């Protein structure tokens, strides 16, 4: 690897919440740099985990994910020549970017076991931070619905890889993803009512894939919390739409932050610091660091739990 080129991995925690249409957006900034994370291509190819989810009936999870991508593609048709194309489904997808490999894929996968339940306490993957891929398990804390991991060049901000994990672990560790339109589930969760809406969650996560950050506007697609039964984030709000269209204008190169005075006014800083599970974003050189990312804090807590020190409560902080 050329030492002149540094890499960053950005983990964007996803959820959502109800409210008014957003009139603004945030693009994800490269930490410490005056420019943003974005794709330098116009054909984003994604691949779904062929295993899907055992907890959703039939193949409805695939239809819901496709509907989320179709919403962004329909938006692109109004302002951009950016395309989102589904490649062949993939077996045993690997989340994260392998340097110097030609086999990196942008994947979407359901994690249907919590790593705390399936990883032996002394497994070397704990120290190596590879348990999620080795055991196909959720490794990011039980209060988080989904997580997008984006790898990009620190020098240019260009995205190299973006993967989405969905926390479908059972037994209170994760969430029941549903694909129906109504009604909202009451105390009893089932696939016949809306618990955690898959299309709602995926539409938000794809926003992260495209370089959008969280906003603190209630009801916006990129607002970072999601109550049970929410479905309105299936529809991309006008602020998130503006962020995408401004970044990838039709017939022009992608627009970096700061290249337009208008963009400069509407682009705000990356989410800061550790936060309550559904509300954080973080980035750090190479791998996520405890001081910079909620994910790092969770990894530290899990190691202590396996060492017999007990489970720590999630830290509280202002919303991202």
Image: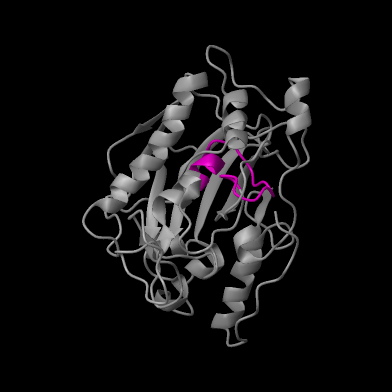
x and y percentages locating residue 181 in the rendered image: 35, 53
Depth order, front residue of 34/249: 249
Instruction: Indicate the quadrant where residue 8 lies.
Output: top right
How many callouts does the rendering have? Answer: 0
x and y percentages locating residue 27 in the rendered image: 66, 36
Residue stretch rendered in magenta on the structure: 204-222
Q: Main secondary structure of the magenta part?
A: loop
Image quadrant where one finds the C terminus: bottom right
Depth order, front residue of 295/278: 278
Residue drawn at x 38%, y 58% as measured from the top left: 110
Depth order, front residue of 269/226: 226
Does the magenta run of residues contain 181? no
Does the magenta run of residues contain 219? yes
Residue drawn at x 34%, y 64% as measured from the top left: 193
Residue 51 as seen in the image, left or right of residue 100: left
Residue 12 as seen in the image, left or right of residue 174: right
x and y percentages locating residue 300 in the rendered image: 63, 71
Residue drawn at x 55%, y 25% as measured from the top left: 40
Residue 304 as seen in the image, left or right of residue 199: right
Q: Is residue 122 above or below residue 158?
A: below
x and y percentages locating residue 243 in the rendered image: 62, 31
Q: Is residue 124 above or below residue 26?
A: below
Image quadrant where one finds the N terminus: top right
Q: Is residue 29 above or below residue 73?
A: below
């Amino acid at each position: 690897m050329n030492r002149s080129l540094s890499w960053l991995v950005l983990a964007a925690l996803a959820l959502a919440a109800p409210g008014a249409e957003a009139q603004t957006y945030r693009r994800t900034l490269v930490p410490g740099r005056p420019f943003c994370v974005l794709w330098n291509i116009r054909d984003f190819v994604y691949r779904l985990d062929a295993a899907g989810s055992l907890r959703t009936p039939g193949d409805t999870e695939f239809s819901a994910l496709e509907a989320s991508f179709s919403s962004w593609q329909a938006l692109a048709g109004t302002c951009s020549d950016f395309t989102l194309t589904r490649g062949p489904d993939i077996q045993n997808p690997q989340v994260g970017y392998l340097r110097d490999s030609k086999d990196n894929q942008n994947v979407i996968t359901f994690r249907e076991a919590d790593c705390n339940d399936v990883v032996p306490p002394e497994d070397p993957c704990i120290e190596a931070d590879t348990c999620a891929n080795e055991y196909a398990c959720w490794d990011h804390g039980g209060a988080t619905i989904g997580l997008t991991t984006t790898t990009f060049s620190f020098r240019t901000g260009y995205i190299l890889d973006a993967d989405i994990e969905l926390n479908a672990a059972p037994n209170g560790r994760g969430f029941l993803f549903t694909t129906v339109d109504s009604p909202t589930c009451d105390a009893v969760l089932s696939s016949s009512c809306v618990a955690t809406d898959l299309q709602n969650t995926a539409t938000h996560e794809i926003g992260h894939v495209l370089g959008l950050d969280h906003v603190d506007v209630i009801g916006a697609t990129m607002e970072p919390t999601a109550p049970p039964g929410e479905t309105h984030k299936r529809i991309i709000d006008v602020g998130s739409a503006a962020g995408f269209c401004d970044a990838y204008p039709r017939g022009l190169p992608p627009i970096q932050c700061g290249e337009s005075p208008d963009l400069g006014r509407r682009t705000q800083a990356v989410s800061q610091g550790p936060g309550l599970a559904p509300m954080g974003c973080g980035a750090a050189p190479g791998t996520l660091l405890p001081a910079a990312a909620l994910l790092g804090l969770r990894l530290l807590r899990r190691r202590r739990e396996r060492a017999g020190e007990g489970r720590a409560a999630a830290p509280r902080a202002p919303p991202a």
